[in-house]
Image: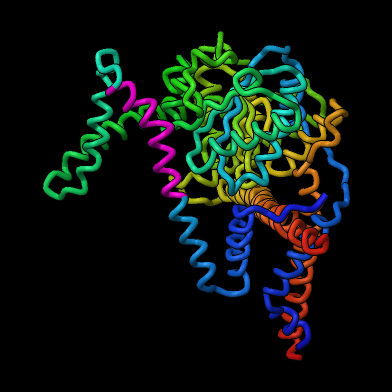
Amino acid sequence: MPVQLPGFGEWVAAFLTLAVFSFLYRDNVIYRVAESVFAGISFGYYVGLARINTLQPNLFEPLFGDFSNHWILIFPFVLGVMLYLRYVPKLAWISNWSLAIYIGYYIGVNLTQRLHGEILPQAKGTMLPLAGEPFGQILCNLVVIVGVVTVLVYFFFSSPHRGPLKVTAKLGIYFLMISFGASFGYTVMGRISLLIGRLTFVVNDWARPVVQSVIGS
Amino acid sequence: MKWAQKLLLVDRRIIFLLVFLGALIPILSPIGLIVQVSPPVRAIFDRVERMQAGDAILLSFDYGPSDGPELDPMANAILRHCNKKGIKVLGISLFPLGGVDMAFARMADLTRDLGGQNGIDWVNLGYKDGGQAAMKLMGEDFTAVFPTDADGVPIEEIPLMQGIRNYGDLEMAISLATSVLGEWWINLVNAQFGIDVAVGSTAVSAPKYYAYVEAKQAIGVMGGMKGASEYEELVERAYPDLAGLSRTATVGMDVQSIVHLVIIFFIIFGNIMYVLTQRTRREGI
C-alpha cells in the first residue's frame, strides 16, 4: 500500500515547529513570524470560541429568542457593553461600575473558596498523629509538621530572626529549598515533555511519511 | 587548567544538539523501560475501577495544545478505561485556548479505537467562560451552563444527559488541567459540593497537587507525562486487549529518561569543570 504524503495541515505545523526551533540557533525572522502567527491565531481563536460557545448560547439566543423568560440577562449584557466604554474617554468612568461588580463577585467567591476549600482543609491536613501509627508513618507525619511550622516561622517577619527563631527559620529555608528543587525537577520534565511532543509529531507525522513516500516511489 | 576553562565555555548549541539527539533516538527506536506506578495514580484508577456500568463521570479538558504531550495520553487512557467499564463520560472545557478541540480529538480517538458513540458513551458539552462561576452553577444545574452540547444539540435531546442534573448525579470529576483550574476543581467543587475530584496536571503544576492529596481533598493526581504513563500501564494491565493501542506517554518516558541522563551528565560535568578551574585559580596555575 503506497504511503500517503502528509496533508497541508501537517506541512504547516511542521514548518512552524521548525521555525520556532530555529531560535535555538539564533534569533531570526522566521522565528518571529511563527511567534506572531501564534499570538494572532490564539487571540482570534479565543474571540471566536467565546462568541460561539458562551455569548451565542448563553446570552444572545435566550435574550433575543425568548425575551420574556430571559429578560434578566439584559443586566449582564448591559454590564458587558459598559466595559467597552473605557475606549470612549468621556464615558470611560462608566466601565468602572462593571468592573466593581465583577471584582466584588470574584472577591466573594474567592474568599469562601480559599477559606473553606484551602486554608481549613490544609490546616487540618497538618494535624497528624505522632503516636499509635507505624514508625515510618510517624516519621512522615513529623516531617510534614516540622516542615509546615518552620516554613511558617521563616515567613514570620514581625520580630527579628535571632536565637531559636533564627535556627527554626533556617530549617524552614532547607524545607523550601527541597520543595523548590522538586518543583524545578518537575519543570524540567514538563519542558522535555513539550519537546517530546513536537519531535514525535515532526518525526512520526511529517518526516517519516515524507521519507517513506520518497523511498517508496 | 586551560582545557577545563575551554570546556566550561562550550557553545550551548552543542548541548542543545546532544539533548536533541537524546530525544530523537528513543523516538525512532523505543527502549521500553519499565513503568513503576505511584499510589496517587493508582488511587484514581481504583476509584474508576470501583464504579458500575452506567455510572457517569465528568472529564474537564482544561488544557490546550501546548500541554497535549502530557495531558492527551491521560485523556486517552481514562476514556479507554471508562469505555471498558461502561462508564459514561461527560466532557467539558473551562480552558479557552483549545480545550474544546482537545476534547473532540480525544473522543474521536476513542470512537476510532473502541467505537464509543457520541451522546451515548460520551458527550462534549463544549467550552464555557467564567471558570469559578461556571463550576458553581454546574453544582445546581448543568443546563444553565451548557444549554447545548458543543455541536449545538439541546441537552434534553442527548441520551447520556438523561438523569444527570448536577454534580450529585456524577461519581467523580477529573480535571486535566493547566494553570489554576485544577486547584479550583478541588478547593471549590470538592469543598462545596463534596464530589470526588482527581487531577491530571502538567508536570510544572504537579508538586502543589500532592498537598491536596495528602489532605484528602483530591483522591489522586497524575503528574505530567510520568503520571500519564502510569495510568496507561494500569489500564493495559487490567485490560490486556488494549495492548495494541498507542501508549504515547510510555514511549515518551523512554525519551524523558535519556534526556534526563544527558542533563544530569552536563550538571555533573559542569560542576567538576567549575571546581577544577577554581582550584587552578587558587593555586595560581
Rendered location of residue A78, percent (x, y): 22, 31
As drawn, the residue found furthest toward the top would be: B163
Q: Which residues are magenta?
A: A42-64
Q: Quadrant of residue B42?
A: top right
Judge whether residue B149 can be spotted in this image. yes
Question: Residue B178: x and y, percent?
Answer: 56, 41
Residue B57 to residue A23: above or below:
above
Name the quadrant of the C terminus of chain A: bottom right
Return the residue found at the far bottom. Answer: B285
Return the x and y of residue B139 as percentages of the image width and height: 48, 17
What secondary structure prevails in the magenta region?
helix
Task: Report the side of B238 relative to A30 (left or right).
Answer: right
Q: Residue at x 48, y 32 (%)?
A: B127
Say above or below: A32 vs B167: below
Q: Residue B173 lies in magenta, yes or no?
A: no
User: Looking at the image, how many numbered discs can be counted on the residues?
Assistant: 0
**Looking at the image, what colour scheme do you see?**
rainbow
B13 or B93, nearer to the observer: B93
Relative to residue A85, is residue B12 drawn left or right? right
From this viewpoint, which residue is outermost toward the left? A90
- Image side of residue A117 versus residue B30, left or right: left
Name the spot of residue A79 as percent of width and height, x first.
24, 32
Which residue is at 72% across, 74% downward?
B14
Placement of A77 over or under A39, stated as above or below: above
Q: Return the residue nearer the eye: A182 or A49.
A: A49
Residue A167 appearing in the image: no
Residue drawn at 65 percent across, 40 percent down: B71
Q: Is residue B265 above or below residue A145?
A: below
Q: Residue at x 36, y 31 (%)?
A: A55
